[in-house]
Amino acid sequence: MTNTTRNLLLYTLICLISLLAPHLAPAFRVQMALLWMMILFALTWDLGGGQMGYNSFGNIVFFGIGCYVAAVVQRDLFFAVEGQSQATGDLATSSPLFNYFNGLAVGLALAVIIAVAVAAGLGSGILGLRGQYFAICTLGVGIAAGEIASGWGYIGAGSGMVAPIFPGGPGQNATFFYYFFFALAVTCFFTLKRLYASRFGLAINAIRDDEDKAEAMGIHTTRYKTIAWCISAVFLALAGGAFGHLNNFIDREVAFPGITFGVWMVLMAILGGKGTLWGPVIGATIFHATQELFWTYLLGWQRVALGLLIVVIVVFFPLGIMGWLRSRWPERFGETVDLEARAAPISLGETR
Amino acid sequence: MVDNLLLLFNAPILSAQLLVDGILIGAIFALAAYGMALVWGVMDIINIAQGEFVMLGGYVTFFLAAAGVHPLYTVPVAAAALYLLGWALYRTVVFRVVDKDMFISILATFGISIFLQQLANQLFQADVRTAESGLGSFFLADGLIVVSQIKVVSFICALILGATLFLFLKRSRLGQAIRATAQNARAARIMGVNTDRVFSTTFALNAAICGAAGSLVVMTWLVHPYLGLAYTLRAFMIVTVAGLGNMASVLLASLGLGAVENFAGFLLGTEYQAAFVFSLLVAILVWRNALLSRQRKYLK
Amino acid sequence: MVKMLKNPRWAVLGAVALVLAAVGPASPKVEGDTIIFGAAVSLTGKYSTNGKNTQDGYELGVKRINEMGGVRVGGKYYRIKVLYYDDESTPARGAQLAERLINQDGVKFMLGPYSSGVTKAIAPVTEKYKIPHVEGNGAARELFTQGYKYLFAVLSTSDYYLRDAVNLAAEVAKQQGRDPKSLKIAMAFENDPFSLDVRDGVVEDAKRWGMQIVIDDKLPTEINDMAATLTKVKALKPDILVVSGHARGATLAVRQVSDMKIEVPMLAVTHCDAARVAETLSKAAEYTLCAAQWDRSLNYKDKWFGTAEEYAKRFEKEFNYAPPYQAAESTAALLVYIDAFERAGSFDIEKVREAIAKTDVMTFYGPVKFDATGKNTAKPMVLYQIQNGDYKVVAPTKVAEGKLIHPIPPWSKR
């Protein structure tokens, strides 16, 4: 088998399993939908953290913006008409225009626009920071955004807001959002794959390796950094909008879960191997599965186990699964000199 | 907000109360921040588990007080207990990440922080705990300004510990080794400094100071397993602003932060207190960066 | 196969297999001779104190019912059991767990979680699946304005928590010949669904009396200090200070009011029995008014537990602490199901729902009767005052054990 056919076979197989999954295991649709969301989280984080060397703790802001914007659009533009019951998702008006799906589409579009605007605006300010200062600054942004959301009455402040309920029978929303997240994650994967193979990928890798030299070589570092952040923002806003609708209830903790989702996206990318394309996917899958296992079998102790797991991951696999495989069997990676092999950050384990 | 401002103008004595309270709150932040500056400077590790050390120190005092010991006497006990914990954590986990990328150590200590916090939840329950110091309050300016004595004790502790730390680093043999390691770990090793021992002592010392802080927190406010994050974030902010080298500026920045927070809570309403503080952090970082990049231009 | 290993991407397939293994087989656990309830409770996270109370409340109910032989439905006795998951005090996790309980574990009857926020997230799920959801710990009014048909709450909505305090202050003012309009209220509420709803109730009643609201602070959920708010209180000298912020808010308020020697004639808080302020803060907590859904001294009685006091004793024996009302509410939610099963005589979900809606039962916790929106309108709230380290019911007057001490004496005389 050549490389290409093998890849094709692999992709088809994964796609096939994923498309059938909700029918094979209908009880787990929500968990599987969230698995795709986790993969998306890890991929978008790795774009900045792994490929560009900008470790952000604040990407969750775009997720939260997506959550709130999409829900507010539904609430104020599509379900504001008198007599419509949010509890069942049925619309009293006969207007074909004002239904749940149109509302969702408009909401998501608006969410993307706002998130990109915020990313560009914030980026111009804080993407100039280096190293840990950038990490801390984004952490601050994430927390401040959550605090502002919980003080703002229009979006429900601390009381949160209830998003309209999915029309149709029980469980249908899970199927719908499963495919939504699946499509989103796959689109994100191939977009990034394409990007990493282009000049853009080389440029952001150059920024990671030595920003000053990259600048000296004539790369518009600020522009590239901002674009990379905006791409993350697009996907995260879409994911956030959908998650808010899937969850039906939004408050600060749902929309800006900085110490859960916000940190997990980093962990998943590191577990899989940051700076690689497949690393985040593998990392997210394993992390999500482990987490669900903990939840099911370690009632109350799951977080203790999670803390231990994190320590073990970063202490013993600082290069991630991909990095570990690579250092274990370099010849196998040597055979197929491909993107992830080149992009794996060797410098990570070096002493200062 | 406007009426709050007017209130301050009408009763200027309130500003004094806010300032005093803020500064005394800041003293506790200072204790958490000293250790963070030390660990950051010497080991190049940002310790996210800082707040959990504070929390555990609080529990030591709570349990001893429940067993009948006067809480004030438990401050050194809490410090000693946390010293041991810090040392153990260094020996098991932290020494493995000390020479790694800083981001790795952030995540490793984050893992430790979740572990400690959740373990506390499972072992001690999530109930809100307090310990009574039995101290009263000082009344100043005809009772218009009230200062609770336990806060003053915390303040004095912060001053004394800061000074001790300063002298220890400057004068003692180990302190000199710590400073040498901070300047250049490799060179220090060549000169015969046992950097491993320096690291373990530094980390344990940090935990001990935090433990003392926690002990004061449980006497002043309360303690519960999820207390940590607030102290970690603030310690972090303080050190970012104050820089790593100077204990005096860490103390000043802590007191300043406490005061600013208290005023922000008063003027904007407590719901925006945290938002304000973290927006301030972002602003400070961006401003600092702007200054740095201006310097860089001259260099070019 | 070895060749395939060369390409680490195959690891993804392995990982997918791992996920499928992790989620495990779905087994419908409905009957047999055991009725299985599902509940997401907060065992970790910021609500875990009350989350544990909730779980203990359910467990005591389960134990007692099984001791008594179980539930008789259609001539046969069934044992009961509750399946728990930990929602980590977050609404998002709560919603997912509800879905999991219904889909994977095949649960047909839900018991509520702790806190209004999590209940708000779970209610749409149970509504969608048409699964009855009886809860005792989600009190926000907004839960009952959405038109939910499967959600039932045994408690009074949260806006009632501190209304009594406001009314009490107004009445006392009248007796003393003061116009209630002249009263000033200071409010500090945590920024969460429950406390904001408590706030709405206070605001409504304050407006009705024409009182003036001088402070309206919202405490952050990560509250560690209240100095800023209390400094305002000191300056504006309100007649009433109301605080609501779960156990943490109660402890902080009581402690710092005493530390800063704030003089206020009436201090009313929620959750002070769950925070055990009288026990831990002793003198500082004296005279504080506390809102509660239930008290052991109340004169209610049922066939399962006997009187409220007997319930409390049983609870203490089992769990070694006095039952806060959060536990009693939870037990009551379970009793509503038991009563409904016996009347419905079947496990048909619609029949059970019908039976729940028609509930009119007396329990140790108080009368339970649902209105059209699913909330219990039959049971009043109570207001305690801490007197000599004891919680004494002072309102409503019908059930009061003690007399309200008002105003709170100044610190110099305490």
Image (cartoon, helix red, strand yellow):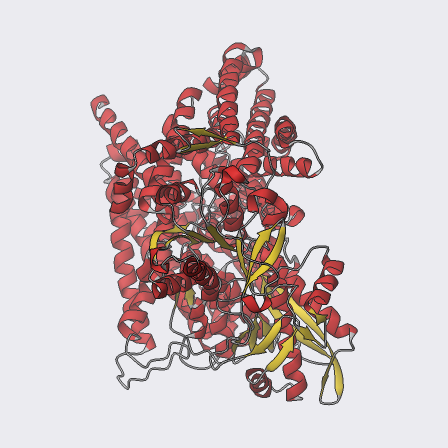
Residue at 45% x, 59% y is C172
Q: Is residue A94 left or right of residue C375?
A: left
Q: Nearer the viewer, residue C301 or B169?
A: C301
Q: Is residue C2 visible?
A: no
Residue at the spot x=60%, y=65% of the render? C294
Image mark count: 0
Q: Position of residue B20 (x, y in %)?
A: 40, 30
| Quarter where residue A95 is shown | bottom left
Residue A319 image point, x, y percent? 51, 41
Q: Nearer the viewer, residue A208 or C267?
A: C267
Above or below for A101 versus A266: below
Q: Can you say whether B75 is above or below C386 in the image?
A: above
**Against B163, is A282 above or below?**
below
- Residue C102: image location, x then y, percent: 57, 74
**Residue furthest front as drawn:** C177
Q: Can I make out residue C330 in this image?
A: yes
Query: Relative to B41, is B66 on the left or the right?
Result: right
* Res C363 quadrant in image: bottom right
- Front one among C61 and B120: C61
Side of C60 where C137 appears, left or right: left
Residue A70 location (% of width, % of height): 32, 65
Check the image and report above or below for B168 versus C252: above
